[in-house]
Amino acid sequence: MLFKHAGILHNHVNKKGLTGVLREIKRKSGRILNDKRFRFIRFLFIGGINTLFSLLVYWGLVFLGIHYAIAVFISNMLGILFNFMTTSRFVFRIWNIRLFIRFILVYIITYILSVFALKLLFLVQVDKYIAAAIIALPMAVFSYLLLRSVVFCTTEKVSGSQ
């Protein structure tokens, strides 16, 4: 049964392309995608993707021998671009480039807190890879709260500006 569904999905993706499939998923799941009550659920899903992206960048840089503070910095810089696109479009349903400055400020705060938290974990001999995983969820929640209250707090005012 699983292989049958996988085959159907594969054929569906080939016919419509990945963008077409994503558009259809969006259309069929309109309530969750558009209802503000489900915003935090969307944030958790997109945040998971964003966190995985940032962790992979961080781990890759640490693996290459880059100092953890620089690895966090690079991971955050790349993450900011990726996260702004995904969070603004899929979580808060706003695409307004003017919000990008506030978004960056949130990530500066997140960066400072991340480096501080990692340093504390390193002091108690936690492995660099595990330390990043330990702080990932608390930093995601902290980021959501800041984004909701500082960056996307004016959703009704700017949601029409695409």
Image (spheres, rainbow, N blue to C red):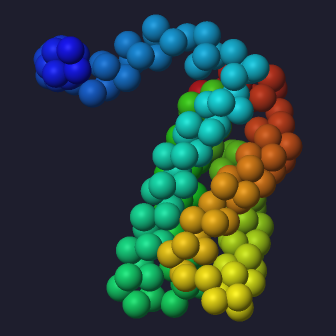
- x%, y% of residue 135? 67, 66
Q: How many marks?
A: 0
User: Which residue is outermost to the front?
Assistant: 1
Q: Residue at x 63, y 60 (%)?
A: 136
Say if 54 sits above or below 38 in the image.
Answer: below
Residue 99 x/y as whole percent: 70, 45
Q: Is residue 78 above or below residue 62?
A: above
| Residue 102 rendering spot, x and y as whole percentages | 75, 53
Q: Is residue 66 left or right of residue 116?
A: left
Left or right of 57, for residue 12: left
Left or right side of 81 for 42:
right
The residue drawn where x is 54% and y is 46% is: 48
Tell me the residue at 73%/57% (across/down). Answer: 138
Answer with the quarter of the image where residue 89 lies: top right
Where residue 157 sits, quadrant-wise, is top right
87 relative position to 13: left or right: right
Q: Is residue 152 above or below residue 74?
A: above
Quarter of the picture containing the C terminus is top right
Q: Is there any visible trace of residue 82 in the rendered image?
A: yes
Q: Looking at the rendering, in which quadrant would you find the N terminus?
A: top left
Image location of residue 143, percent across then percent down: 73, 53
Which residue is drawn at the image coordinates 61% and 31% (left, top)? 42
Q: Is residue 94 visible?
A: no
Instruction: Relative to 131, say whether 84 is above or below.
Output: above
Q: Quadrant of residue 73?
A: bottom right
